[in-house]
Image: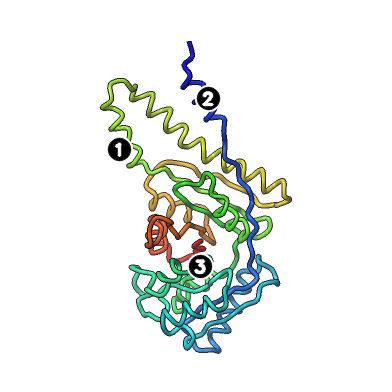
Amino acid sequence: MIKVDQFESVFKSAAKLSFKRQELSFQKIAVVTDLEEAEAKTLAARVRAFLQVLGDGPEWIVLDRAQSETVEQLLGLVAQEKPELLVTYRNLHSAAWRWPHSLGPRLDVLTQATSCPVMVLPHPRDVSAFDASMQHTEVVMAVTDHLVGDSRLVSYAASFTEKGGDLFLAHIEDDAIFERYIEVISKIPSIDTDNAREQILKQLLKEPRDYIESCRRELKEEGSDLRVHSEVRTGHHLTEYKKLVEDHSVQLLVLNTKDEDQLAMHGLAFPLAVELRQIPLLMV
């Protein structure tokens, strides 16, 4: 006889979270620099050309060296202007951009103390990386350790992908964590370890794949011509995401930054932001 909990499992497995596109506004965009006024305006013009996918509607605000000298001053201007997107670069007001160890204190604060997304560019003094990165957003990737139900992340990634472009949705299950749980399960005599390993892994990968399919379907129904690609696998987060970025020549990486349970940056975001220095990042 089929047990009640088997019926419950069948019912739950049939219930799927579907993607719902969120309406996003980019009426005001602030470009934050540590450059003198003329250089700041030149850089802002390049950013505007790079983000042509957002159209001609946004009002662009340029903050130069004098306006971003201190964290307090910078946060005050952001609070006053209320932009829907901040664009800046790593190691603002610092020569530490030469070393791949940090984002710099101003950027750390901006990503956590402001409510709007922050786009992080390679440092403009790193001329080759900056020039190479400021071309297109035809290939965009959204990465997370829990993609299912994250309509906000996917909506941002889709909004920044140029028409006819490629949108990669990536979900990596940490294999070390998975093996730890399987090890615990193996010590429970009433559970078949091999079956548990097979079925749990199957479900862990099925859910994000189903969600990505719902993203593809919803975007197509609204008339989008984006090509949506699924990248779901197990592995080490940082290693796998770096490989995906390289394999697909990703031009913009979109990732969650804020964690409602802590003041610090989301666990996955910081190492990715430090390691992936050659491409723009959209930290939402």
Q: Quadrant of residue 109?
A: bottom left
CB-based contact (under 8 Å), mark 3 and mark 2: no
Question: Earlier along the polypeptide chain: callout 3 or callout 1?
Answer: 3
Name the residue that disc number 3 marks.
118
User: Regarding mark 1 in the picture, which secondary structure is present there?
Assistant: helix
In the foreground, 153 or 71:
71
Name the residue that disc number 2 marks.
10
Question: Earlier along the polypeptide chain: callout 2 or callout 1?
Answer: 2
Look at label 3 and name its amino acid.
Val
Q: Is residue 271 left or right of residue 220?
A: left
Q: Nearer the viewer, mark 3 or mark 2?
A: 2
Circle on res. 54: none
Q: Is residue 150 left or right of residue 218?
A: left
Task: Examine the rendered structure and indicate whether residue 225 appears above or below residue 87.
Answer: above
CB-based contact (under 8 Å), mark 3 and mark 1: no
Query: Residue 40: x, y in percent?
Result: 54, 84
User: Regarding mark 2 in the picture, which secondary structure is present there?
Assistant: helix
Task: Examine the rendered structure and indicate whether residue 209 appears above or below residue 163.
Answer: above
Look at label 1 and name its amino acid.
Arg
| Spatial separation of the CA atoms under disc 2 and disc 1 | 26 Å
Question: Earlier along the polypeptide chain: callout 3 or callout 2?
Answer: 2
What crowding class fits label 2: few (fewer than 14 Cα within 10 Å), some (14-19), or many (20 or more)?
A: few
| Spatial separation of the CA atoms under disc 3 and disc 2 | 41 Å
Q: Nearer the viewer, mark 2 or mark 1?
A: 2
Query: Residue 201: x, y in percent?
Result: 42, 33
Name the residue that disc number 1 marks.
180
Q: Residue at x 52, y 68 (%)?
A: 133
What crowding class fits label 3: few (fewer than 14 Cα within 10 Å), some (14-19), or many (20 or more)?
A: many
Q: Quadrant of residue 189?
A: top left
Task: Examine the rendered structure and indicate whether residue 158 appears above or below residue 129.
Answer: above
User: Regarding mark 3 in the picture, which secondary structure is present there?
Assistant: strand
Determine the residue located farthest toward the top in the rendered image. 1
